[in-house]
Amino acid sequence: MAAVTTGSITRYRVMAYVTGLVLLLLVLVAMPLKYLADRPALVESVGPVHGFLYAAYLAAAIDLAYRARWSLTRTVLVLLAGTIPFAVFIVERRVAADATAQRSAATG
């Protein structure tokens, strides 16, 4: 059985922050430029970057979910948080605190 490690928590936290920041850039800057100023260039470059980073976020979150033995519902909700602006930051704090507490309890 895999155990929650500091590395798995750190990977998840880094990917959550990076994915969240790029999503905010996409939603708050690039999309308004595309639709209000008819300048789609930023969406065309930031969009694929967010897609790649979201895939890495999914991998990190699934790894942590497996190690922490999350329910399917919790796993899916954490995975979806990477698609909702600001939600990923809120979810990251709670997930990191829970995973750290679980790791501490397991190590004694």
Image: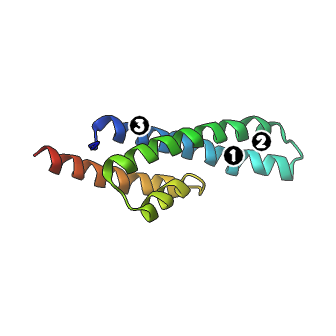
Image point (71%, 46%), residue name? 29
**Circles 2 and 1 in contact, beta carbons < 8 Å:** yes
Under mark 2, the amino acid is Val
The answer to whether 49 is drawn above or below residue 62 in the figure is above
- Residue at screen point 41% across, 43% down: 63
Labels 1 and 3: the sequence-earlier one: 3
- Work out which residue is located at the far front of the displayed protein and give it: 1
Residue type (three-letter) at the residue carrying disc 1:
Leu
- Residue 69: assigned label: none
Determine crowd level at label 2: few under 14, some 14-19, many 20+ residues with C-alpha closer than 10 A. Answer: many
User: Between marks 2 and 1, how big is the CA–CA gap?
Assistant: 7 Å
- Tell me whether the residue at label 1 lies in contact with that at label 3, contact meaning CB atoms closer than 8 angstroms: no
Mark 1, Cα crowd under 10 Å, few <14 / some 14-19 / many 20+, is: many
For residue 68, side relative to residue 37 (left or right): left
Q: Residue at x 63, y 37 (%)?
A: 52
Q: Which residue is mark 1?
A: 26
Residue carrying label 2: 43
Give the CA distance from mark 2 to mark 3. 26 Å
| Label 2 vs 3, first from the N-terminus | 3
Q: Position of residue 16 (x, y in %)?
A: 48, 45
